[in-house]
Amino acid sequence: MATVLPPPSKRQKTSEATRAREQVAAPAAVPEGLQRIQFRDADTGEPHGPVVTVSLADLDPKNLSLLLNSLLGHTDPTERLPYRFYNPIGEGEFNQDEVIKAYVQGKVTTELQLDIPCRAEAVFKVKAVTRCSASISGHGESILTTAFSPGSSSRLATGSGDNTARIWDCDTGTPMHTLKGHTGWVLAVAWSPDDGILATGSMDNTVRLWDPKTGTPLGGALKGHTKWITSICWEPYHLRETGRPRLASASRDFTVRIWDAVSKHTDMALTGHKASVSCVKWGGAGEGGTIYTASHDRTVKLWDARKGTLLHTLSSHAHWVNHLALSTDHVLRTGFHDHKGKKEIPDTVEGKRAKALERYKAATLPAHGVERLVTASDDCTIYLWEPSKSTKPLARLIGHQKQVNHVTFSPDGTTIASAGFDNHVKLWNAADGKYLHTLRGHVGAVYMVAFSPDSRLLVSGSKDTTLKAWEVRTGKLAENLPGHKDQVFAVDWSPDGERVGSGGQDKAVRIWRH
């Protein structure tokens, strides 16, 4: 009697179907032949180097990067810049398989010159911080917020639960000024883009302004809010009226107030949120800019900064919106300052404003000239928006298993980093929101992340008492930075790339260097 084989199981059927699909989707063989290519700047279209001829088999990003660096004279490995290449026949980044497929299908021929858009990923290189150069005590309670001045890495401001803010000299590792006046915890500190004023916001419902050079208060407290100040942001320098700097403060009283830093009066109050406002950002688009506010009422609102009118409400989140970030945050924070230092700062106010505007426009180029927005929520999701074009999100970024506490764009506007209570940092593509890497290493909630100014590195601060420095391109750990004796609440990377500053529950400010 012949043996009858049993019918295939469901698992076997699924496996066969998968194998069949994989066989159909086998990559196309690389055709033989040579191709004339011209590298062009992705933003301006200007040519980089001469037209060269390469083998079709060598059309991959690694070879293209080596070739472009050699064409531009970067022969020393330490001088080579990392380049990002874009699809010459469509959207998105360069993909060798897609280009080869176009040749096989006859959409592209070797007779024609192929223009390959490219963009240098780093104008200058920042080294990963590796050691703690100073541990400075002085605060009597936990350090809740920290920020380097836009002009240099020499000055760091911190706000604490001891009702004071402090300015530290990072060159010598000593305290410079103690800013006394608040009667509640200092929850927010923000430097004006011209480096001339420091603003602090507190649980005593007030904002205070200080001269950072002398540590003296600039007048009395700015009163108007009826609950804690949660976030502060300055008006972009290129939009500022001469001699009239302004700032915005968000509060748990459901409102945002715009203040004139000279007269100390409220210009306007933005009312419309139905719960605590957790974060405020002042964008640089339009005549007077756009103010973005995130709230525990699950919405993000956009306001006309000149008229104070509500422009849009973005309402896709299902829980509190904890934080928001703009693709232009880095240049708005630093204004006319850049990594080249004081020698490159213009002498006149008009020159400074022109440079700040030029840097702002350059920061919007990766998103085709518009500001992008990213929001993080207790609903474990992140949304990417282009609010000037649509009130619908560009992408929903999912992957975190717990609340997302902090989110930020890289200075070059190409990458988003998010910090969650699930102990993870995640990296996303800022163009389309696609997931890139999960940075695993922390064993406690991650409270905050900060990019290096060249966008190649990221530092994170965690409940597990450590900071960690990561390589953005690979998602790998560059340095583990133990030293704090308790949770690390706040971390910042100086705009010139020289230092990282951190603070937390152990009351000590730590300065980290390479």
Image (cartoon, rainbow, N blue to C red):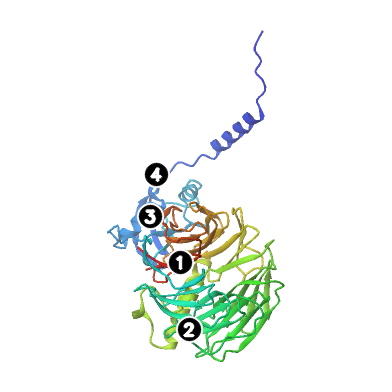
Which element is circle 2 on?
Answer: loop
User: Mark 2 or mark 4, which is nearer to you?
Assistant: 2
Mark 1, residues whose alpha carbon is within 10 Å: few (<14), some, or many (≥20)? many
Query: Which amino acid lies under the numbered mark 2 shown in the image of this protein?
Result: Ile
Between 401 and 357, the one lying in front of the other is 401
Percent coordinates x, y for residue 274 in the rendering: 72, 72
In terms of secondary structure, where does tag 4 sit?
loop
Distance from the alpha carbon under mark 3 to that under mark 4: 18 Å
Residue designated by label 3 = 64
Q: Position of residue 26 (x, y in %)?
A: 51, 39
Q: Which mark is residue 197?
A: 2
Pick whichever of labels 1 and 2 is earlier in the sequence: 2
- Secondary structure of the residue carrying numbered label 3: helix
Residue that numbered label 1 is attached to: 502
Where residue 96 sits: x, y (%)? Answer: 45, 50
Give yes or no for contact between labels 2 and 4 (Cβ–Cβ under 8 Å).
Answer: no
Q: Nearer the viewer, mark 3 or mark 1?
A: 1
Query: Which image quadrant for residue 480?
Result: bottom left
Label 2 crowd bin: few (<14), some (14–19), many (20+), radius 10 Å:
many
Name the mark nearer the viewer: 4 or 1: 1
Q: Nearer the viewer, residue 147 or 372?
A: 147
In three-dimensional space, the C-alpha distance between marks 1 and 2, rounded to whole angstroms, equals 21 Å
**Which mark identifies residue 32?**
4
Between label 3 and label 4, give the one nearer the viewer.
3
Ranked by sequence position, the earlier of labels 4 and 1 is 4
